[in-house]
Image (cartoon, grey):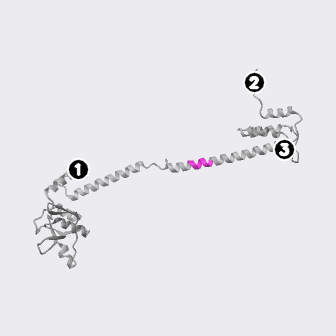
Amino acid sequence: LPNPDSLLTEFTARNKPLVVDWEHSSEHRAPQGLDAPAAGWIDRLESRNNAIWGHVEWTPKAAQQITAKEYRFLSPVFTYAKTGNQIVALVSAGLTNQPNLNLTALNQEQTRMDLSAICAALGLDAGADIAAIVAAIKALKSEGESEDTVAANRRQPDLDKFIPRPDYDAALSRAANAEQKLADIATAQLNQAIETALNVALNAGQICPATVEFYRAGCQKDGGLEAFNSFLKAAPSVLGAAPSVAGTPPAPSDDAVIVHAFNRFNPPARVAA
């Protein structure tokens, strides 16, 4: 292996992981149509001190066997050039206990020491296996998800007592618009009633055109229209009935009568002597 980087280049160009099986079943059993399941997949290679190291994603079964030291070694399958016996590409690898090459054993003691730190963090015994560690991590994750769900439920308000703010704002806006429409309708009806009363008073000669704005302003006040109608019931015809043809109503014959009509509708305030 004079040029380890060339194997990395070939692996990258292949653009797919290398299979790790049991006892080279991919080379012996697969060609016969027999099952040759994967124990793992080498998804990354690195060159370290002129040696090739691979990162393996193990299957649960293989991980358990390696943890239990049922399998300790990897045996690589590679192609090589007959001239010079130079390795040119990796093909696969097999879990075995009788390797042809003197390679680093799987499941070294330092790995167990690393796992012991993880076990301590999870509250497990230092000798806990991978299965126990994975189970503890899953339980911790599930507990965290349950707590998140409970917290989310606590944050969710009771819809019998609360409504979402957008719904509240929309309802408030609709109520305000309805109130405004009702107010507009009431104002229009009041104005129409005032104009009707003023026209009746003008036609009956109870008020003169010069005082229409005065009476209109008085009718706009609270209770003003009712007071004006009460005034008209007792007010005399100071000008005479309006003519049946277009024209200016006759001038009043007695100014004192007009003053009397004004005072009845809008009496002056009393002043102490």
Is there a contact, CB below 8 Å, between mark 2 and mark 1?
no
Question: Which secondary structure class fits the magenta region best?
Answer: helix
> Bounds of the magenta span?
172-178
Instruction: Name which residue lies at 88% across and 45% down.
Output: 243
Which residue is outermost to the bottom?
32
Give the residue number, with chain letter if any, for mark 3.
203
Q: Residue 271: which numbered mark, if any?
A: 2
Residue 173 on the magenta span: yes
- Image position of 24 (left or right of 185): left
Q: In this orientation, does residue 234 appear?
A: yes
- Asked which secondary structure carries label 1, the reply is helix
Q: In this view, does 99 lie above or below 196?
A: below
Task: Name the quadrant containing residue 41.
Answer: bottom left
Residue position marked by numbered label 1 in the rendering: 121
| Front residue of 239 and 144 | 239
Q: Nearer the viewer, mark 2 or mark 1?
A: 2
